[in-house]
Amino acid sequence: MPAYFTPRRRATGYTAIELLVAISVVAVLAALALPSYKSVIARYRVRTTVEDLKATLYFTRSEAFRRGGRVTLRKASAANCAAPADENWSCGWIVFSDDNGNGRLDQGEEPLQASRVPMGTRVFNSSKGVEFMTTTRWGEFNGIGAFGFKVVPADSADAALSTVLCISAGGRLRTATGAASC
């Protein structure tokens, strides 16, 4: 090969048109996937809240066994949380040793556990006007019989995304997805 003739190297990389086509394809696919992704996130948040509530109920019962009763699960009240209705437990809940049996965490009583409701969900108690449940030494929630909690996504009206946690009078737990009530 003569010295004056050097083979030209092929340019590597992408052209601007190829880059724009690839970006637009990714944008279209993301736009199609976003609505289903929102429902996945909402379903995950609801399930997380239900599992946290289940764990709290089991913890309340086990502490009642251990302490001989008088362990109370109460709707939390926080200054920065607006949950006006009695059946709305969206501010969270607290478990404490209720030595005097009045259903309120008084000075000298031991708080055992406090839980906040994860962002994006709301929790409703099926028992109207019940702000607390005291557990007997046998692990039963006394005075209210069977009850339940409904967990719904805060930003969706889709009933299929909600879950109901049903508690029998003896303390047995059961969940139902998309159900209106126990």
Image (cartoon, helix red, strand yellow):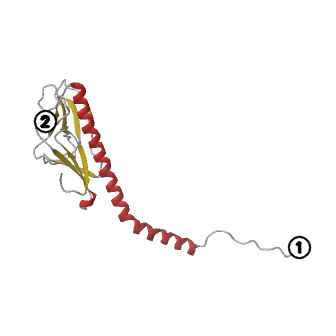
Residue in the picture at 44% in, 71% down:
28
Residue in the picture at 19% in, 56% down:
180
Q: Position of residue 141 (x, y in %)?
A: 16, 37
The residue where tag 2 is placed is 142
Q: What is the secondary structure assignment of the residue under circle 2?
A: loop
Q: Position of residue 86 (x, y in %)?
A: 13, 45
Q: Quadrant of the N terminus?
A: bottom right
Q: Would residue 156 be visible to someone looking at this image?
A: no
Q: Position of residue 30 (x, y in %)?
A: 43, 66
Q: Nearer the viewer, mark 2 or mark 1?
A: 2
> Within the image, what quadrant is residue 67 found in?
top left
Residue in the picture at 24% in, 38% down:
57
In the displayed structure, would residue 155 be above or below residue 137? below
Q: Residues within 10 Å of mark 2 (few under 14, many from 20)?
A: some
**How many numbered callouts?**
2
Rendered image: mark on residue 3: 1
Q: Residues within 10 Å of mark 1 (few under 14, many from 20)?
A: few
Front position in the image: 109 or 11: 109
Front position in the image: 106 or 79: 106
Q: Disc 1 residue type?
A: Ala
Q: CA distance from mark 2 to mark 1?
A: 99 Å
Label 2–label 1 contact, CB within 8 A: no
Residue in the picture at 28% in, 58% down:
161
Q: Disc 2 residue type?
A: Asn
